[in-house]
Amino acid sequence: MKINVWTKKGEIKAIKNQKKLISKWTLFLFISLILVSIRVLSSLFIEVYYNQNTKGHSYQWISSFIWLLILIKILISPEILYGYNALNRKINENRNTNLILNKIWKIAPNINLNNAQHLVLKEKIDTNILTYIEEIEKLSFEYELFRDSKMTISDLASKLNIPKSHISYIFKYHSTISFSEYKKAIRIRDAMKYIELNYLKNNTLESLSKKVGFTSYNPFFTSFKEISGVSPLEYYKKGKVEFD
């Protein structure tokens, strides 16, 4: 328990909170069981060595009350009743539809891993994969990190306070696009937001491309058309007509 539950570390905030909750419940159960065990052992010791019943047997309701509390705790704590992994799967069924880019994420891919390092990562990551993806999306749609044209996967990992290997694993096995393509998609969404806020009224498309993280206009234009289906200027004109 000490190694696998009470002192087990989580990388990101949401996972830390989950592990903290589980740790508290298991500690409560452990202490309750110790108290009940001490009482039973004390009764046996007195009965064997002094050949008499333990005084206070009329207070056996105390033990019953303790076990009743334990039962209630188990019943109102799904992570204990169903097991944390089972609970996590049930929660994930309702959470993956809340992802903004849910079409690119693969929550439960059917993959066979032969790489020893990836097997270790799978054990660490898969239980909390939705939490990882939610944290990636949350940071992504703040946009600021992706506006840096030199931004790397290491920068994303550092900002999320998790190892780079975890992010690489997620984009390899739980995403339909590469990290490089993901960066483009986020930057284009950022550009669309600026266009909708009438950024082009007083600024150029070249300026917009650099503002969202592209090094020049050409890759920005190509990516914009690939992702949105229209050119940046067409998107602007269409939005302007709808606004008018």
Image (cartoon, rainbow, N blue to C red):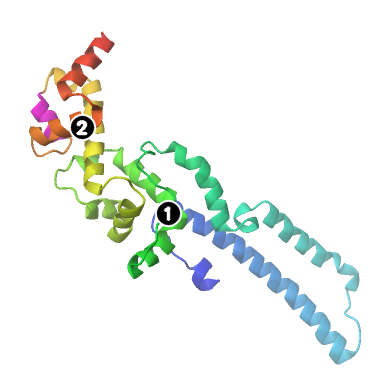
Residue 160, given in percent of the width and then of the height, sits at: 32, 52
Residue 101, given in percent of the width and then of the height, sits at: 36, 38
Is 131 colored magenta in this rendering? no
The relative height of residue 229 versus residue 42 in the rendered view (above or below) is: above
Residue marked by disc 2: 226
Residue range corresponding to the magenta coloring: 204-211
First in sequence, mark 2 or 1: give its number: 1
Please rate how many residues cluster around mark 1, counting C-alpha atoms within 10 Å: few if below 14, some from 14 to 19, many from 20. few
Tag 2: residue type? Glu
The relative height of residue 138 versus residue 62 in the rendered view (above or below) is: above
From the viewer's side, name the closer residue of 4 and 28: 4
User: Principal SS element in the magenta part?
Assistant: helix
Q: Residue furthest top?
A: 244
- Nearer to us of marks 2 and 1 is 1
Residue drawn at (79%, 81%) of the image: 42
Alpha carbon of mark 2 to alpha carbon of mark 1: how far?
Answer: 29 Å
Name the element at disc 2: helix
Residue 216, given in percent of the width and then of the height, sits at: 8, 36
Tag 1: residue type? Asn
Residue 155, given in percent of the width and then of the height, sits at: 23, 52
The answer to which image quadrant residue 29 occupies is bottom right
Name the element at disc 1: loop
Residue marked by disc 1: 110
From the viewer's side, name the closer residue of 136 and 93: 93
Q: Residue furthest bottom?
A: 49
From the viewer's side, name the closer residue of 211 and 92: 92
Q: Would residue 28 be found to the left or right of residue 175 on screen?
A: right
Residue drawn at (56%, 57%) of the image: 84
